[in-house]
């Protein structure tokens, strides 16, 4: 969008709205932005023109809030079923904005706390999983999507096949 400039980006949006026959209320119209927060995730389109990718990441502060929730639970040494459900939901949502689905492996331990009968004590696997999630929240890279296919080297296949007079 940087190459288009703000006026060009707005003109492109208006053309797309007209083509799709979308009529936005005046109160809903906003200037085009290359960094948008939507449903708890930030969509960063700024690197699109120069680096040929876009980034999808947790919104600002979400990683730190998640980390703090986990560290508070670890300090208490136990977690209720409801708290486990809440952290599991946040971990699942956070995971969609991180590269490689970093949180997924630790979700089973949260499910066990949520539905198990361990009285919510945070020991062993449960403690390890929570510490892993806290670290992943702060250190895992954001998810990026390449906009252009990277050129691949051609594949050369050698064969000893032959053809008869009909070309088969």
Image: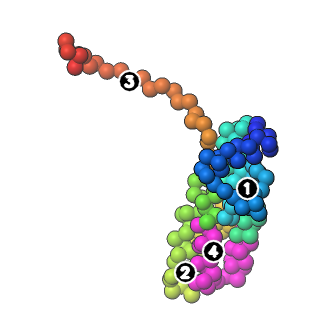
Residue nearest the observer in this picture, 28 or 103: 28
Q: CA distance from mark 4 to mark 2?
A: 10 Å
What crowding class fits label 4: few (fewer than 14 Cα within 10 Å), some (14-19), or many (20 or more)?
many
**Disc on the earlier residue, 3 or 1:** 1
Residue receiving disc 3: 157
Q: CA distance from mark 4 to mark 3?
A: 51 Å
**Disc on the earlier residue, 4 or 2:** 4
Quarter placement of the C terminus: top left
Query: What residue is shown at x 60% (from left), y 69% (from top)?
Result: 129
Quarter placement of the N terminus: top right
Residue receiving disc 4: 87
Residue receiving disc 1: 36
Is disc 3 placed on a helix, strand or loop?
loop
Disc 3 + disc 1, Cβ < 8 Å: no
Please give the label number shown on residue 21. none
Q: Is residue 21 above or below residue 59?
A: above
Q: Is 111 placed left or right of 47 in the picture?
A: left
**Disc on the earlier residue, 1 or 4:** 1
Please give the label number shown on residue 114. 2
The residue range painted magenta reads 67-92
Q: Is residue 78 above or below residue 43?
A: below
Q: Is 95 placed left or right of 5 in the picture?
A: left
What crowding class fits label 2: few (fewer than 14 Cα within 10 Å), some (14-19), or many (20 or more)?
many
Number of numbered discs overlaid on the protein picture: 4
Is disc 4 placed on a helix, strand or loop?
helix
């Amino acid at each position: 969008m940087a190459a288009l400039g703000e006026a060009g980006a707005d003109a492109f949006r208006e053309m797309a709205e007209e083509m799709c026959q979308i009529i936005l209320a005046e109160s809903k119209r906003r200037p085009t932005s290359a960094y948008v927060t939507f449903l708890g995730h930030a969509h960063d389109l700024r690197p699109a023109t120069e680096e040929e990718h876009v980034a999808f990441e947790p919104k600002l502060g979400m990683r730190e809030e998640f980390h703090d929730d986990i560290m508070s639970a670890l300090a208490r040494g136990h977690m209720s079923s409801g708290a486990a459900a809440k952290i599991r939901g946040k971990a699942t949502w956070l995971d969609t904005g991180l590269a490689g689905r970093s949180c997924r492996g630790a979700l089973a331990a949260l499910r066990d706390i949520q539905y198990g009968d361990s009285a919510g004590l945070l020991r062993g696997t449960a403690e390890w999983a929570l510490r892993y999630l806290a670290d992943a929240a702060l250190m895992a890279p954001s998810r990026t999507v390449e906009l252009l296919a990277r050129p691949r080297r051609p594949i050369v296949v050698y064969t000893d096949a032959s053809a008869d007079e009909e070309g088969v």
